[in-house]
Image (tube, rainbow, N blue to C red):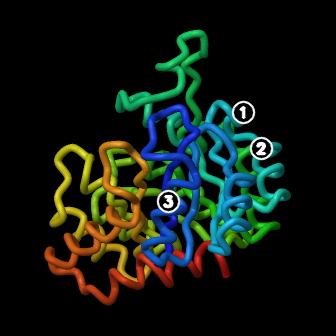
């Protein structure tokens, strides 16, 4: 099993444990590895230390929120040159996050500006910087993750990713509150080349979410489905357990269990490692 989305302390938000605690959960569950994500700092060095400690495949990257300078080619370059395998487009500082009233760093520190970030077609002026980031991702054969950007922005990113020859595009939980896409929209983006993430966090915490709703998204994704935990919250189960609960729930909702097993193992491993 390979979990391509998990959070650990230290972080701005409370987490279930520190890096080594989360690593221990995966070790005891005999996972092959995981992707350590942070909304506000690069996880490249932390992931490298965990990989050396354990021998597991632990991957890090950077998220282009305000702390990284937004859509900032320098932040992307620093993470990728240091060995990062993924660049997430804005999440907590995406314009969608602000509109939805979801938590942001500026909620914790009111001296920060409530700056938000977007890419075309929402923010045409960001095109040059965004394309520089995409070129860097292509040069390093890394993963482009769409973050919390809108469906229209995901479509733009997929189109430009194709231009730059990016082979690895992950649509970050597209059916979550942000960006909140329906199965038909998800299918269109999958057909355009995106891998579709469904997370255990959605099942555990997304208002109005159900296994049946996520099963429709899974069917829309087809062979491009990726399952992850997105866990690490104190009120979520340990990440391996959360991912297992998601697989069981989707199987009960009628999704083929073999497809689900591959979506939580070989598909994300191929996306991030090979």
Residue 153 drawn above or below residue 136:
above
Of residues 95 and 40, the one drawn nearer to the viewer in this rendering: 40
Q: Residue under circle 2?
A: 75
Q: Mark 2: give few (<14), some (14-19) or many (20+) Cα within 10 Å.
A: many
How far apart marks 1 and 3 lie (CA) works out to 22 Å
- In which quadrant will I find the C terminus? bottom right
Write the residue at 42% across / 65% down.
228
Query: Is 256 left or right of 191, judged from the image as shown?
Result: left
Q: Residue 26: give x, y in percent of width and height.
A: 48, 68
Q: Are marks 1 and 3 in contact (CB under 8 Å)?
A: no
Query: Is 272 left or right of 207, judged from the image as shown?
Result: right
Of residues 188 and 12, the one drawn nearer to the viewer in this rendering: 12
Q: Residue under circle 3?
A: 5
Q: Mark 1: give few (<14), some (14-19) or many (20+) Cα within 10 Å.
A: few
Of residues 33 and 106, the one drawn nearer to the viewer in this rendering: 33
Write the residue at 28% across / 77% down.
219
Of residues 100 and 79, the one drawn nearer to the viewer in this rendering: 79
How far apart marks 2 and 1 lie (CA) works out to 7 Å
Q: Residue 168: give x, y in percent of width and height.
A: 62, 71
Q: Are marks 2 and 1 in contact (CB under 8 Å)?
A: yes
Write the residue at 45% across / 35% down.
14
């Amino acid at each position: 099993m390979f979990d391509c989305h998990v959070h650990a302390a230290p972080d701005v938000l409370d987490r279930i444990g520190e890096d080594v605690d989360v690593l221990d959960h995966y070790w005891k569950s005999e996972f092959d590895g995981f992707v350590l994500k942070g909304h506000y700092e690069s996880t490249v060095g932390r992931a490298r230390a965990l990989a050396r400690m354990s021998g597991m495949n632990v991957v890090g990257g950077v998220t282009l929120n305000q702390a990284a300078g937004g859509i900032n080619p320098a932040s992307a370059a620093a993470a990728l040159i240091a060995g990062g395998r993924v660049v997430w487009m804005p999440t907590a500082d995406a314009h969608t996050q602000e509109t939805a009233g979801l938590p942001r760093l500026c909620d914790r520190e009111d001296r920060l500006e409530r700056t938000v970030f977007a890419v075309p077609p929402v923010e045409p002026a960001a095109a040059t910087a965004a394309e520089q980031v995409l070129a860097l991702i292509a040069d390093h054969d890394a993963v482009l993750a769409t973050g919390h950007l809108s469906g229209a922005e995901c479509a733009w990113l997929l189109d430009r990713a194709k231009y730059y020859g990016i082979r690895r595009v992950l649509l970050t939980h597209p059916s979550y509150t942000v960006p909140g896409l329906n199965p038909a929209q998800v299918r269109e983006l999958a057909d355009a080349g995106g891998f579709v993430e469904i997370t255990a966090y959605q099942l555990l915490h997304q208002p109005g979410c159900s296994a049946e709703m996520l099963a429709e998204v899974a069917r829309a994704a087809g062979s491009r489905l990726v399952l992850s935990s997105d866990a690490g919250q104190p009120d979520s189960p340990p990440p391996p357990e959360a991912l297992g609960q998601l697989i069981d729930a989707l199987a009960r909702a009628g999704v083929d269990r073999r497809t689900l097993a591959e979506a939580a193992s070989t598909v994300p491993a191929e996306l991030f490692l090979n």
